Amino acid sequence: MKIIINKSFFCSLVLLLIVQLPCQLYAQVNLEKEISQAIKLISLEEYNKAKAKLEPIVKSNPNSALAHYNLGITQLNLQEVALCKQSIEKALQLDSQVDPKYSEYWKGVSYYYNLETIKARESFKAYKGTLSEKSAEHITIDKLLSALDEIDAQKNVKPEFYIES
């Protein structure tokens, strides 16, 4: 009797896997398709539409690093800098290699706009380290690093006018 129970359990398990696997594959393909459509909207500078597409994706797929990452880029372009930083940090927490080429750049930009100069500098330097020596992007990163130096220099400067009470 015990052998029959084990065989029926095994058959049920195999049947369940056969049914579940295509459903999971379909969901993954559909997720990738939805994110690709949002990326297309970002490239067309349709940031509000991209955000409208990505927010429900992030809500229903909270472990999708790619969805969080692209939502962060969208939020940055919509001047939602605090949200941008949260989304990009979440994406990199989920998958540090979500975008191996540009993730340090976008993380640096999110810190830059949130005036977190130390973190921005670290990210920009890490990004700069990935560039080839001949890359024209070195100039852009050097300008951003200089701007961070200027921001830091101004942090402790009192304005020429202020009211003492």
Image (spheres, rainbow, N blue to C red):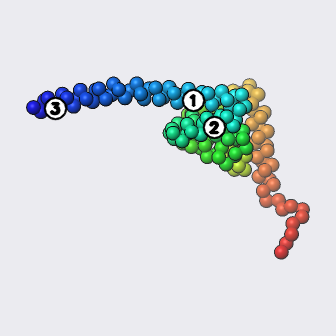
Left or right: where 11 falls relative to 83: left
Task: Say which label, 2 or 1, has the lower sequence index.
Answer: 1
Q: Is residue 16 visible?
A: yes
Neighbour tally class for label 2: few under 14, some 14-19, many 20 plus, Cα within 10 Å? few
Residue at which label 2 appears: 52
Name the disc covering residue 34, or none. 1
Q: Earlier in the sequence, mark 3 or mark 1?
A: 3
Residue at position x 13%, y 29% in the image = 3
> Farthest residue in the left direction?
1
Q: Amino acid at mark 1?
A: Glu
At label 2, the amino acid type is Ala
Residue at mark 3 to residue at mark 2: CA–CA distance: 50 Å
The residue sitting at 73% across, 46% down in the picture is 113
Foreground disc of the pair 3, 2: 2
Residue 37 percent coordinates (x, y) = 61, 27
Cα separation between marks 3 and 1: 43 Å
Q: How many marks?
A: 3
3 or 2: tag closer to the N-terminus: 3
Q: Residue at x 65, y 34 (%)?
A: 50
Looking at the rendered structure, the secondary structure element under dot 3 is helix
Q: Tell me: residue 57, above or below residue 162.
A: above
Quadrant in the picture for residue 154: bottom right
